[in-house]
Image: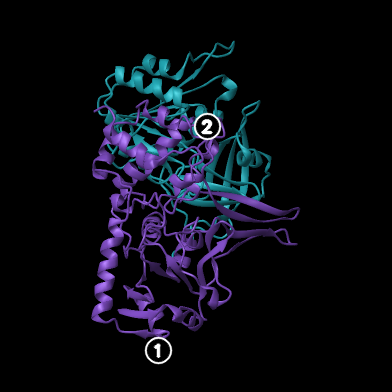
Chain colours: A purple, B cyan
Amino acid sequence: MEKVLLKKALPQWVKKLESYTIYSPQEEGDFWNYEVIKNAEIIDLDYLNTVLSPKKIIFPQREVLFEFSTSNEDELKVKEILPEERPAVIFGVRPCDGKALTLTDKVFGGDFKDPYYWKRRNSTTLVGLTCNTPPSSNCFCLSVDGSPHSKEGLDILMTDLGDKYYAESFTKKGDELLNSAKALFKSPTAKDKKDLEKIKAESKKKIKRQIKATEKIPAKLKDMFASPFWDDESLSCIRCGICTYLCPTCHCFDMNDEVTSSSPIKGERVRTWDNCQFPDFTMHSSGHNPRPDKASRLRQRILHKFQYFVELYKNYQCIGCGRCISKCPVGIDIIEVLEKARDYGS
Amino acid sequence: MDHNTYIPKLAKIIEIKEEVGGARPIKTFRTQFLNVNDFSFRSGQCAMLSVFGRGESMISISSSPLMKDYLQFSILKMGRVTSSLHEMQVGDVIGIRGPYGNSFPVEDWKGKNIIFIGGGIGLAPIWSVLNTALGKKGDYRDLMLIYGARTSKDLVFKEELEELKKKMPVHLSIDVEEPEWKEFVGFVPQNVTDKNPSPKNAIAVTCGPPIMIKFVIKALEELGFKDEQIYTTVENKMKCGIGKCGRCNIGFHYVCKDGPVYSWAELKKLPQEY
């Protein structure tokens, strides 16, 4: 389904979606981040990109999996805590961040479907926004099979045509959203379609950074496991973990018990994001650590994204958003690391 | 919605046996589910044990699947959760989820000789598959156990090993001499060389400390065992048990899901990161 919506009518559309929880990018000091929108009038899609991707809504940084308690009869009880049923809409999703969810879908799917992830994923409608101009100077989506107008993972893609949005719906969930405010949407004119194609074509040309010959990298990395390359590349790393913390495709997590009462025992099992750049991520209780240094941990991050994930799922586990490059305090640049690896020893 | 594998099933501890005392104590726990009796597993698989309020730890199941009345775990006191388990009493309730991981391919081993080689707590995963083979003795040819620990006090399943000697050859060892010790003195790999099992129509299964496994494999290779005839188990830190939390991987393999059992031929193909 394809429709156009006048920009000034956007808040009216949001108002119609009262049965949904609405998330949109909101300015918080120096940053933009996804938050629940309290007033439809404040919706503002004139932003670059959020610090954290919408992953944080589908797979929150902290969530309770179940509660445990001992009753008066000394009987232990475990109560499953699943996310609430209420459907949600996320506005202004950058196409790369939408694609990232198709990658986390693979991890949280498979033989053991993760009920917490899928409950949110299935009840959430993603409204994307074409990147007319790159949201970051470190964008490189074109090098990892992405595009500034990719529809992967999105239900709707909106493209800014100046005074209106061109809305393309790809799914039933997307159609439902457009149908919820029929009076606001018009059919696109021939000029609208022409403008859309022009903006999409130009959007690709504006992306400055790229990895050349990405397809050669997985096989090359496979031969570099024992290389001293990783020592050199990880020298400056201060293991802060911001690269994976901000990554829309990273999915590693920890599970711990948070206790509110020790006698009788009462508490929650909590899942939180974890980070492969931290030393204790893989450390055994004996003290043995299969990834004992910065080199092995940087190698894990790069190989997971550009070798292991490709071996498992045929996709790079990277969407080219550039967050890990822009926010790294010591300037480790995944594009440079990959290009150096590709050319290493030749 | 699919079954929620993160929710542990409650089980009561019905028996606790102190195997090893001292600074590195080992206890064997037998557990019975409070409500579930559909828990089925294969030898080599693990279960995630919960001490509510302390957390979870992945432990190999040391009982045989042929034993339906209880699940058995032999646990070395090591970190937060295993230390809490060591403080628990008969009647206390823990959580169990799983089973997770692959298993020893015992069906493929029918008609073969099997040599089990263990060190220390490494006898626990072997114990399950050994008892499975023993319970279906007609399916296999000659069985042999080579097992050692630092001292005679560090050997697990001491009484059971005496019983086992009536059913199959059991070769024990300790690292350094003790006055009453009549069996082999030396490291487990040396005992393997000493007992000289034939590689002909044979499978070797080895579990124990990584350094022991390394030299056992070397000893087996010198005896003529091929990579495909040698099986071992790998352990890594785990949280989810289902290949999602991201820490137990060796290359693209998640040990919790794709392991813990590997042939030496399979393990050799993976990066050396365990």
| Circle 2/circle 1 CB separation < 8 Å | no
Type of amino acid under label 1: Ala
Q: Quarter of the image containing the C terminus of chain A?
A: top left
- The answer to whether residue B1 is visible is no
Closer to the observer: label 2 or label 1?
Answer: 1
Question: x%, y% of residue A142?
Answer: 29, 53
Number of labelled discs?
2
Instruction: Please tell me in which quadrant of the rendered image residue B110 appears.
Output: top left
Q: Nearer the viewer, residue A44 or B47?
A: A44
Q: Nearer the viewer, residue B194 or A40?
A: A40
Q: Is residue B143 left or right of residue A294?
A: left
Question: x%, y% of residue B52?
Answer: 64, 51
Type of amino acid under label 2: Glu
Residue sitting at x 31%, y 39%: B139
Residue sitting at x 60%, y 22%: B153
Residue B159, above or below B101: above
The local secondary structure at tag 2 comes to helix
Same chain? Circles 2 and 1: no
* Mark 2 nearby-residue class (10 Å; few <14, some 14–19, many ≥20): few
Q: Quarter of the image containing the N terminus of chain A?
A: bottom left
Chain of the residue that carries numbered disc 1 in the rendered image: A
* Mark 1 nearby-residue class (10 Å; few <14, some 14–19, many ≥20): few
Determine the CA span between mark 2 and mark 1.
79 Å
Instruction: From the image, tell me which residue sits under label 2.
Output: B160
Instruction: Please tell me in which quadrant of the rendered image residue B134 appears.
Output: top left
| Residue A183: image tag | 1
Question: x%, y% of residue A27?
Answer: 55, 63
